[in-house]
Image: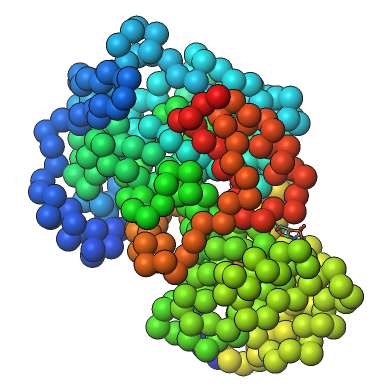
Amino acid sequence: MASPRPPPLLLLLLLSAWAPPSCGSPQRRHWRRQRGAGRALGCGAREEGTGTGTGTGIGIGTGTPGRMGRLPALLVRVPVRCFGGSPRARSAMPSWVIDRYGRNEVLRLSREMALPAIQFPNEVVVRVHAASLNPIDLSMRSGYGATALNMKRDPLKIKSTENEFPLTLGRDVSGVVMECGLSVSYFKPGDEVWAAIPPWKQGTLSEFVVASANEVSFKPKCLSHTEAASLPYVGLTAWSAINKVGGLNQSNCSGKRVLILGASGGVGTFAVQLVKAWGAHVTAVCSHDASTLMKKLGADDVIDYKSGNLEEQLKTLPLFDFILDNVGGSTEKWALDLLKKWSGATYVTLVTPFLINMDRLGVADGMLQTGVTIGSKTVKHLLKGVHYRWAFFMPSGPSLDEIAELVDSGKIQPVIDQVFPFSEVPKAFLKLEEGHARGKTVIDVVNKK
Ligand SMILES: NC(=O)c1ccc[n+]([C@@H]2O[C@H](COP(=O)([O-])OP(=O)(O)OC[C@H]3O[C@@H](n4cnc5c(N)ncnc54)[C@H](OP(=O)(O)O)[C@@H]3O)[C@@H](O)[C@H]2O)c1
């Protein structure tokens, strides 16, 4: 039986699934050449009403390979930002933070968050024009994943701060590069970019955010910042599940029968458009009121999961080559029976116990439990002739480059449920918590009210 990817044994010892990509695309390398060698020092961009400047400081960094080429661990000079005229403007910025885990009341607007500093030569500072919310923001607000994320934040426990607070949530950003680390040659101040910031880093519900240049990509030209901010996290998650884990791509997807469970949310609306753009026959499962949206996005069949027994409805259809499960829970018990046997057909779920196991059992036992679970399920289903996989969001500028091309060619459109001003972030969280998303909840950061 053809295998889409090697089995994710021991869940890839997990956090490695979240490691930044190790190399840039050839196109990126080509662009980099076009742009010439890196600047001697990073420098700041100028935006309306915001003075900027450049100084130098000392940082210790281990460069990541790829867009900037590999750098050894070294002492480097990094620029020190100077975004504003007044001392206060230079040192502080507004951010939505939490100081403890809990429900919505833990969200606090701080005007005293320190401006983010470039720590590594491959980092950039981005002025956030728009951000968006994802279910992980709700989960992280309540402490989900804290054990694993804190281990990733400070594996050797050498940081001076005792905990992760104040913590800024928000993973998506569309904005403008303000400053680049010394080894960044692919971007320059003033570039309009988008990115999804991994969850162990400070988030994007803030005026500025620091990202690795490997995580950043040029924003699609045809989208506004508000539109662009709706796509990176869900787009990269769908890309990871469908392409990296599921093995589907433009050249092998044509005519394949693809089932998307939970098609009306952020990941689902992106996934429907992606596999459709690659020529698949798409069956979307959502509730009745989302069926018009699904048809508009290109779904060939739309099944209402609230009208009768979903499993029975789907069993009346021809078998599938690929299933993306954005719902989880009991769907896993029957969905794999809908796949073609012994043909390389694959079920990929985004709803996994990976982080919960570590929260519940601690790092070592949690990883062991996760490894046993994924290993046993993979083998059990392999013996029945189908592939069973877990997928995770993976930050990746090069993948965002490919997504940007699909967006600019009109094959993928942003699907926005509602836009909130920066001052109403808690309302946006409540909206997300109500469920029934039809695309994304976006935060307009620049047009603060
Ligand atoms: N593993 C990872 O790294 C990763 C990354 C991103 C997301 N995720 C997970 O993937 C899931 C989807 O994320 P998302 O951002 O798309 O969430 P979302 O925007 O909140 O969308 C969820 C959608 O599912 C629909 N839905 C709920 N129950 C359903 C059911 N039984 N059958 C079909 N549709 C159903 C909801 O609409 P109605 O309720 O109105 O039907 C909603 O449109 C979440 O559980 C999220 O935590 C995992």
Report x, y in % for residue 348: 62, 70
The structure residue drawn at horizontal position 34% and vertical position 33%, both measured from the top left corner, is 125
Farthest residue in the right direction? 308
Q: Nearer the viewer, residue 365 or 15?
A: 15
State the image quarter where residue 165 is shown.
top right
> Which quadrant: the C terminus?
top right
In the drawing, does residue 18 fall left or right of residue 364?
A: left
Q: Is residue 6 visible?
A: no
In the drawing, does residue 122 fall left or right of residue 378?
A: left
Tally the marks: 0
Say if 298 sits above or below 27 in the image.
Answer: below
The structure residue drawn at horizontal position 35% and vertical position 45%, both measured from the top left corner, is 193
Q: Nearer the viewer, residue 161 or 326?
A: 326
State the image quarter where residue 141 is shown.
top right
Report x, y in % for residue 244: 47, 68
Say if 267 sits above or below 145 in the image.
Answer: below
Say if 265 sits above or below 93 in the image.
Answer: below
Q: Nearer the viewer, residue 174 or 162?
A: 174
Q: Nearer the viewer, residue 104 or 79?
A: 104
Q: Quadrant of ligand 1?
A: bottom right
In the drawing, does residue 212 fall left or right of residue 159?
A: left
The structure residue drawn at horizontal position 52% and vertical position 89%, both measured from the top left corner, is 255
In the drawing, does residue 296 fall left or right of residue 426?
A: left
The structure residue drawn at horizontal position 48% and vertical position 82%, both measured from the top left corner, is 279
Report x, y in % for residue 162: 57, 21
